[in-house]
Amino acid sequence: MTEAAILEKIETLNQAVVRLQERVEDLEDLRDLEAAIAENAGKPLIPWEQVKPELELE
């Protein structure tokens, strides 16, 4: 295998690792979101119009 072919293979593997890391992060975010939803189940919702000023979005 030539050096160029080895470098190409390494780059391909690196890109695959980056994609896998992104997927793991997405799955972790999903797990956190599902935990927050479960934790807040049954609690009253806060109207968006009330939250916007509190978050300084207006």
Image: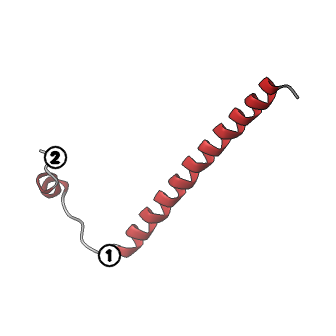
Image spot of residue 17 (x, y percent): 65, 45
Assess disc 2: are there few (<14), some (14-19) or many (≥20) residues with their C-alpha within 10 Å of its C-alpha: few
* Vertical comparison of 16 with 35: above or below: above
Instruction: Name the side, left or right, on which 18 lies relative to 5.
Output: left
Q: Residue at x 88, y 29 (%)?
A: 1
Q: Nearer the viewer, mark 1 or mark 2?
A: 2
Instruction: Name the side, left or right, on which 8 lies relative to 18.
Output: right
Furthest toward the right, the residue is 1
Closer-to-camera residue (30/49): 30
Q: Residue at x 46, y 58 (%)?
A: 29
Residue 9 sits in quarter: top right
The label shown at residue 42 is 1
Amino acid at dot 1: Gly
Assess disc 1: are there few (<14), some (14-19) or many (≥20) residues with their C-alpha within 10 Å of its C-alpha: few
Residue 42 sits in quarter: bottom left
Q: Which residue is mark 2?
A: 57
Q: Do the residues bearing badges 1 and 2 touch, measured as CB atoms within 8 Å?
A: no
Circle nearer the N terminus (1, 2): 1
Q: Residue at x 52, y 54 (%)?
A: 25
Tell me the SS state at disc 2: loop
Closer-to-camera residue (35/9): 9
The label shown at residue 11 is none
Tell me the SS state at disc 1: loop
Instruction: Name the side, left or right, on which 45 lies relative to 27.
Output: left
Image spot of residue 58 (x, y percent): 11, 44
Gap in angstroms between the C-alphas marked 1 and 2: 26 Å
Amino acid at dot 2: Leu
Image spot of residue 56 (x, y percent): 13, 50
Instruction: Name the side, left or right, on which 47 lies relative to 34.
Output: left
Image spot of residue 13 (x, y percent): 71, 39
Q: Residue at x 28, y 74 (%)?
A: 43
